[in-house]
Amino acid sequence: MTISSRSRLDRVTLLLAGEFGIVPASLAEGPSGTATRNYVAETAAGDRWFVKTYAAGTDLGRAESAARLSEYAGLCGVPVARARPVVDQERLVASYKGTALSVTAYVVGAVTADGQLAGRRWEAVGSAIGRLHRGLARHPLGPPTLGVRDRSFDPARARVRLMDLVRRYEAEPPRSSFEQWASRVAGERLAALPLVERLLEKAPPETTSQIVHGDLSGPNVLLRGDHVAAVIDFHPPARRNPVWELGRLALDPRTVLTHADWPEGLARLAAAYHELHPTLPVEELVSVVRLTAAYLGCMVYPLNTVADGLGPVTPSLEAYARSRVLAAVVLRERLDEAEEVLRDHLR
């Protein structure tokens, strides 16, 4: 253990005891997020807590808002990892000498939904997210509204960003194999934007906007058997299209590429979702495959990982980037089939 990591553990231990009233008998590193370093604390009594520490420079006000949105979802009946407030009961995030953290109950015996949607899990996840979106539709920041399409489905915006990325790759030739691949794919994606525009011609001209989770994806949905154990890692409250969020979770590239029966599973998920959140128009739900394919066709991340200094290109990130490209092809190829199955289940 380096001095810096030992010092970090000491600060985490002090914060747990002084701010959260938790005296850990052990503190071990847990699964970390893209911008957090996480630990699992266990007390002498056997209680286990998930400890999320935030990177330097993190807006702690936003972190507090994200934690409170999770608590709000819990009050709406959504399974979440409940927060441990600081001892003054007024905050969910505490900091000390540059270290900031929040604490939630540790979800025992759970696995992520990352590529794991199968069988009855489709309906279970559909019901959980339907309940989540129904609850967030009643959030104090306002009810759902119908308006211009979500920015994730905007080819004009994507064209500007992709052209900028292509120019930068041309100005400074890529060195690593990932950069060479990303440069080529960025050019191909730019050239294929007319295909995205054609996809959107048959999509609803307007989409629903409401408060959403913000980062709903396989790693942030925990499963225990065929049930949803917890929805975790909320972002601060913000309005987005719930179908964009649903597609990110249900049509994860790992699911699309490894489960050939995904159209049927997706339709069952959508039916369970719509039963609990009927506010969302059926035609918008039917368009989830079309909109997700358009979203993937507009994506700049993670092609810009190196160019924008977003962090190291790990083997898992590179594999995920490549699977996104393949999944977009599969979604387009099976679009008519998937939409027909969705309509059958949503009648």
Image (cartoon, helix red, strand yellow):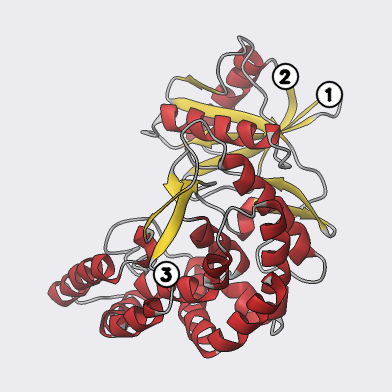
Say what amino acid the circle numbered 2 marks. Answer: Val
Say what amino acid the circle numbered 3 marks. Answer: Tyr
Q: Residue furthest left?
A: 171
Q: How many marks?
A: 3
Image depth: mark 3 or mark 1 in front: 3
Does 206 sit above or below residue 46? below
In the rendering, at what x and y percent does residue 137 appear? 56, 42
Distance of label 3 from label 1 (alpha carbons): 48 Å
In the rendering, at what x and y percent does residue 97 appear? 44, 20
Q: Residue at x 83, y 60 (%)?
A: 226
In the rendering, at what x and y percent does residue 273 appear? 68, 58
Say what amino acid the circle numbered 1 marks. Answer: Ala
Which residue is identified by label 3? 295
Which residue is identified by label 2? 23
Q: Residue at x 77, y 58 (%)?
A: 124
Does 303 sit above or below residue 57? below
Q: Find numbered disc 1 in the image and state the secondary structure of the residue it sits on.
A: loop
Is there any visible trace of residue 166 in the rendered image?
A: yes
Image quadrant assignment for residue 114: bottom right
